[in-house]
Image (cartoon, helix red, strand yellow):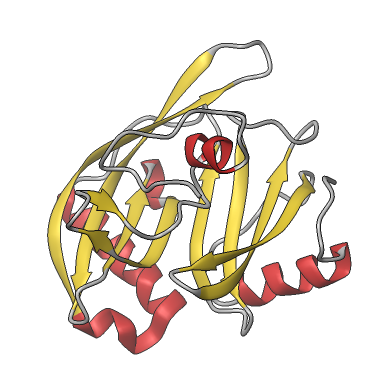
Amino acid sequence: MRANTIDSATALNLEAQALFGTGLATPSDWDIVDVRAGDHDGLPVTVIRRQPGGYRLGGPHTTVVADRDGRLLGYTSLRPGGPTRLPDRAESRKAAFDLIRRAAGAYADDLVVQWIKPHDETVTDDGGQVRTVTGMKVKTRHADGRYTWAVVGPGGVCLTYERGIHWDAARSRRGTPMWLHDGWIAAHDGVGPQLDPPYAIAS
C-alpha cells in the first residue's frame, strides 16, 4: 500500500460501512493499494482504492469515497470484460434509483433525471491494451442544485456512483474533486496534465 495517514484496519472498516446495504462490493482478492484523505467540497473524505497487482493509475480498480460517518459519496468499479448488452433507458433508470435509494435513502426523493445516455470509461489492461468500459449514465439533479448520477453496466451492475457534485458555472467545469477518475488523480499528484473543461481543476 502507498504511504497514507489511515491504517488498513480503519480503511477496511470504513469501506465496509460505506458499502453496507447498498448492494455494491469490492473484489476481496484485490488488495487495498492506496488510502488517502481528501475533501468533497470542503467535507473531509477518505478515498480507498483496490487494485490487482499493486497501485497503477489507468488500470482496473475499485474506489470508494466515504465521509467520516461512513456515508458513501463515490464508488467506481472499472474492469474490462464480461457481457456487453447495455440496459435500456427504463432499466437503467430503475437500477440507478434502486441504488441511490439504498445508498442515500430519502435523498433520492428530491432528484430529477436530467438525461440517460451511454457513457464510456477506459482502462489499460496488464498487457498495455486500452479497453473501453461502457455503461448507461443516469444523471440527476437534486433540489439543492447539486448533481448525482449512476452509471449502470450490463446486467444492471453499477459501474460508478457519485453524489452531491457541484458545477462551477464561472469556469464551465465541475467544481467537486474527482477522486474516482485517474486522469484527475494524476494531475492532483503532479504526474499528469490538468484536464480540460468540463473536468474539475486538480489542486
Residue at horizontal 24 percent and vertical 55 percent from the top: 138
Residue 127, image quadrant:
top right
Residue 110 spot, x, y in % from top left? 20, 83
Q: Seen in the image, is 39 located left or right of residue 106?
A: right
Residue at horizontal 22 percent and vertical 81 percent from the top: 144
Viewer-side residue, 28 vs 130 = 130
Residue 109 spot, x, y in % from top left? 23, 84
Residue 29, image quadrant:
top right
Does 17 appear above or below 31? below
Does 183 appear above or below 111? above
Residue 35 spot, x, y in % from top left? 74, 56
Residue 67 spot, x, y in % from top left? 58, 76
Q: Seen in the image, is 37 located left or right of residue 54?
A: left
Viewer-side residue, 54 vs 203 = 203
Residue at horizontal 80 percent and vertical 31 percent from the top: 53
Q: Seen in the image, is 96 located left or right of residue 172?
A: right
Viewer-side residue, 4 vs 21 = 4
